[in-house]
Image (tube, rainbow, N blue to C red):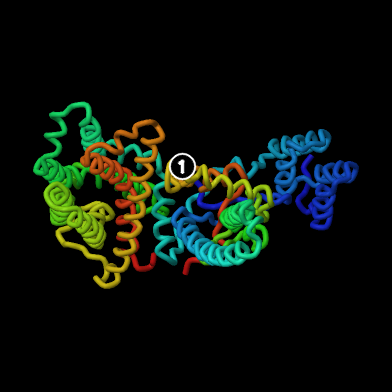
Amino acid sequence: MPQELVIHTPENAEIRVPLAGMFSRAAAFVHDVLLQMTILVFVHIGFVFFVENFRMNHRGLYSSQLFQGLHMMVLFALVFGYYTYYELFADGQTPGKKAYNLRVVTLSGQRVGLFSSLLRNFLRIADFMPFMFMAGLLSTLITDRHQRIGDLFAGTVVIITEEVLPK
Amino acid sequence: MTVELTDNSDARFVACLDNLESSEVSRRRQAIATLEQIGGVRALQVAAALTGDADQIVASSARRICSEAGKKGLVQRSFLKTQALPQTVAIKSFMQLLDEVVFIMRRNLAEVVRDSFLFSIPKFSLVTLFFLCPFYEPLLEIVSQPWLICLLIFIYEIFWRPLVWVSTGNAFLAGFPDNSVRRQSRQFSGRKLYRPLLRAGLVEAVLYALILSSVFWWHFNLNSIGALLGVLGFFWLAAWLHSSSSVPVILLRNKDSEEVVWLSGYSRNFWVSIKLGATLAVLYFVVLSSIASLMWLLGFAEWINGPIVFIFGYFIAADALIDPFVIGYRLLLTRLSMDPRLL
């Protein structure tokens, strides 16, 4: 099984990029989750203050539960949008991936597109099954390019960005 | 007709590639015709990528180039033998070390899984015994006897464990990137190494079995805090014990070794062991919770809420699944310590 992503250019040249292993990816994920949780705590505190203030002044609108729904939408966007945002606007690197020198790219080595990014991140739910990302772990272990289920569907891989030459 | 390689001027070839990448049909067809005239290895490599082109004329010309090149004895890259594995791997962090263990396992995954499954049959049998308890009341009384479980643990760790090392360890060595280790794995003699491995791993096995037995004993006889302390102590001491390399050294040298080998320096390996302990704790949690969730999803919820003895069943099942990784980790760490150039 290869440890590298082999990319063929149109000129039939061959570029080899090292693939990331499951432990580096898991460590980057934990890093991202901690960051997400910190953001969520601050967002939640801000939202509570805002809603409390709003409740005092606009009692009727508050009872329509519009803000509770808005709160849920913000939380959803933060949980799922976090990865998509960084994958699209930070060259495939979330802060966690950056800390571990990892990057998400397509199978041809290109930057990830919006659809691919959304798909690979929504399918984290499938990777989570039956619990604690067991399906994702198994998929990473047995697939040729160390892809979790989301990666398989979106046609993406996680590579190591820093090529370290042996001494 | 043989086309001289000197005909393949760079300018013509580059122009050909540019034209082939364009979206104009006429330019592409002209380019493939020029490529056919140029011939040679470079033309073959480009043509090989165009044999399935959407434009039938380009595709048929590409196939013709490949066919002509084949008649002249040229072969495409994909027909060459698989490239040799790179013999050096740069490991810069603990996570990369763990990744490398997985990479090595993947290179010989079928054998590692087969051997570890075969030699975990005693563990899986015990798990089955635990899970059959709700259906046979007398069985629950038998397996609830701490002395029986402890006896089984001692027998397994002392007499069966060397066999696990020989089989799973050997399968793991066969996936190493360096040729010397792979060659060594082919010259293995389990019969010759069983006694040295049993002797070398005796202290470790007795300590390991004592800790594991204490956890069982505590759980059956003391309160839950004792059990928790036992589990924590088990992870810490088990991880610390991994800094003893007497058993992996015998496998790596493929000969008996009288000395007790420790990895270089207690303080350094203490932190590595703590990290490994934490990683193993997470892995056990992932596997245990996944097994429990899977059973719940499959409709065996009563097995999750069943007798406390089930927890040990889950634990042993998780242990059987994680064991090849631990063996691989110890072998790799020992290999890296044996040859400082590899660090």
Identify residue for label 1: A129
Q: Tell me where residue B265 sits by quadrant.
A: bottom left
Residue at 35% across, 40% down: B291
Residue B170: where, in percent of width, then height? 30, 46
Which residue is depicted at the point 14% across and 52% down? B218
Query: Disc 1 marks which amino acid?
Result: Met
**Looking at the rendering, which quadrant does residue B200 occupy?**
bottom left
As drawn, the residue found furthest toward the right would be B26
Indicate whether A123 appears above or below A70: above
Q: Is residue B290 left or right of residue A111?
A: left
The residue closer to the viewer here, A41 or B242, is A41
Residue B46: x %, y % from top left: 73, 46
Question: Disc 1: which chain?
Answer: A
Can residue B26 be seen here? The reply is yes
Where disc 1 sits, the SS reads: loop
10 Å crowding of disc 1: few (<14), some (14-19), many (20+): some
Is B29 left or right of B136, judged from the image as shown? right
